[in-house]
Image (spheres, rainbow, N blue to C red):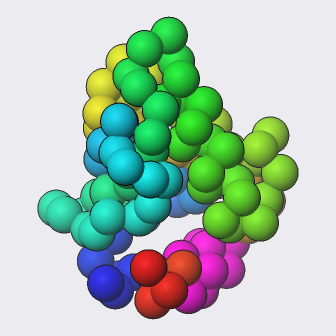
Amino acid sequence: MNVDSIDFELSAKTVLLRLKVLPGAPKNSFRGIHAGQLKVGVTATAQQGKANQAIIDFLARKLKLPKQQLTIVAGLTSTRKKIAIEGITLDQLKTRMQTLLEQE
């Protein structure tokens, strides 16, 4: 998987990351890239915001960022989400993501 296949967006002081979330997965993991979206599986179900919280927890842990720096800005009730990530540059995020994707 190559991070250059992911469609990142830049906004004022944030990097926006598009996700395709796969709730109810066997484990929390990166599952690939499709149509510019990073696919992420989480074990939590898509009920009462559990999968949303699992996505934030998983990404914060993997990216080594405080949870407060990640916010779901679109797709709260959808499997397609847009995450705003603060406190990191696009280049820093791409470097971290590439390392993570190579480990999966």
Residue 94 shown in magenta: yes
Left or right of residue 86, residue 22 in this image: left
Residue with the most extreme left position? 35
Q: Position of residue 14 (x, y in %)?
A: 65, 53
Left or right of residue 23, residue 64 in this image: right
What residue do we see at 52% from left, 18% from top? Answer: 49
Q: Position of residue 90 (x, y in %)?
A: 59, 73
Residue with the most extreme front position? 26
Residue 49 visible (yes or no)? yes
Magenta region, residue range: 89-99
Depth order, front residue of 5/77: 77
What residue do we see at 41% from left, 26% from top? Answer: 45
- Vertical order, 48 against 1 (above or below): above
Residue with the most extreme top position? 48
Left or right of residue 38, residue 82 in this image: right
Which quadrant: the C terminus? bottom left
- Vertical order, 46 against 63 (above or below): above
- Vertical order, 67 against 61 (above or below): above
Residue 18 visible (yes or no)? no
What residue do we see at 50% from left, 10% from top? Answer: 48
The answer to which image quadrant residue 2 occupies is bottom left
The rendered magenta stretch, by its main secondary structure, is classed as helix
Which quadrant: the N terminus? bottom left
Depth order, front residue of 6/52: 52
Residue 70 shown in magenta: no
Q: Position of residue 19 (x, y in %)?
A: 37, 50
The answer to which image quadrant residue 88 occupies is bottom right
